[in-house]
Amino acid sequence: MTDIAEPQHQTPFSGWRGRPGEASLAEVNASVRVGGRTPLRRMLAFVGPGYLVAVGYMDPGNWATSLAGGSQFGYALMAVVAMSSLMAILLQALCARLGVATGRDLAQACRDAFPKPISFPLWILAEAAICATDLAEVIGTAIGLNLLFGIPLEIGVVLTALDVFLVLMLQRVGFRWIEAFVIGLLLVIASCFAIQLAMADPDLGAVIRGLAPTTELVKNREMLYIALGIVGATVMPHNLYLHSSVVQTRAYGRDDAGKREAIKWAVTDSTIALSFAFLINASILILAAAAFHANGRTEVAELGEAHTLLGPLLGGSIAATAFGVALLCCGLNSTVTATLAGQVVMEGFLRIRLSPWLRRLITRAIAIVPAIVVTIMYGESGTAKLLVLSQVILSLQLPFAVIPLVWFTASRSKMGDFVAPRWMSVLAALVAAVIVALNVKLVFDFATGA
């Protein structure tokens, strides 16, 4: 039986400017027992955090970018979905390593590694990323309510503020209940897409061919824009902060043996969960390619329009209903994880603890205002463009989370014996370089009108 660790912790590593403060997510830190005599039972004790992270890889913003990509370019962007998922698996493995080895989440690590002139802008960028994520969830959830229950978008946007009570209730009954809620909704989402794909009958040969990268990606500005949106919607900045924190909810031993076991199972958990997320993300793009692109509907990017067209194109209302149910479940799931990520970022960077309901209402208000303005002025077409834009913004902010993560986990002075293997650090550095290069090209193209 592994001893239950105290939430407060010390670290022997000397590469940090500051000393660790309060444990990350202190109210649930080391709250989940990991005992069990068999490897299977011990592995199952670590199952959960990876699925909280996986939620961020299939939020409503991801739907918008995948729908736009599939309807406009068919299966051509399957390679981007696959590449983004592999990037995510690698980066989330580094997050788990950082959190377990140092007892710091990524926000705390940035605070303890950098002087304020650097850490404060990083905090601003992290908060902006969470607001962009929140914006996508607000719009997606409101559209889901509209599709299923006929609630006007403007009212649905306002109703999303009430999700704070759902999060508070789940936090009070225990962290395992949060994980169970998320996994339950993920199973509903998977079932909905299985129904839709069966009805769409996609071209499997074209799907496989789409997994091969094409030079058209960097030549076609519109394709690059959608591709960056997919990257931003898949490898999301707030997930890096979240995962490095929630892996610490397990009561693993804080000695070297306990940490090594925790890293092994945490990485296993996130890899399986993100593989599941890849199937969902691929399903969205495949559905759009099979149902819309193949039928000449190449401009479908609005969630409401997709819902309306699915029934007639696939020959049954059940496909449209399944689409609406899956969208609403994605919005609810993303709400839970964005709330936790907001807490991690604010407490980690600033050591400021606000009541969860107050912090949630503040961040949700920041997202609600532009969503209401755009909905009133431009209707659903405006919200679709705002969804894709929010994901591109996330992609532009991603390097400011990825680069510190790669640097920390490659530093022996910061990680001690738990420093990432050289091959992993090199691959992660290449991922960071690719993200930066794609972002620079996108900005250059739009600045020059190329």
Image (cartoon, helix red, strand yellow):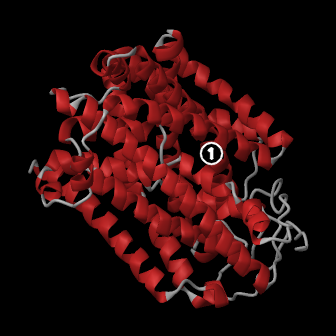
Q: In the displayed orientation, state which residue is furthest to the left.
A: 450
Up the image or down, 312 lies above or below 220; here it is: above
- Residue 71 lies in quadrant: top left
Residue at 76%, 87% in the rendered image: 12
- Residue 221, horizontal then vertical, whole percent: 15, 49
Tell which of 317 and 31 is nearer to you. Answer: 317
- Residue 192, horizontal then vertical, whole percent: 49, 31
Tell which of 49 and 357 is nearer to you. Answer: 49
| Residue type at tag 1 | Thr
The reply to whether residue 65 is visible in this rendering is no
Q: Which residue is mark 1?
A: 337
Residue at 21%, 61% in the rendered image: 213
Numbered label tally? 1
Tell which of 42 and 69 is nearer to you. Answer: 42
Q: Quadrant of the N terminus?
A: bottom right
Residue at 74%, 66% in the rendered image: 40
Question: Horizontally, is 324 left or right of 385 in the view?
Answer: right
The reply to whether residue 282 is visible in this rendering is yes
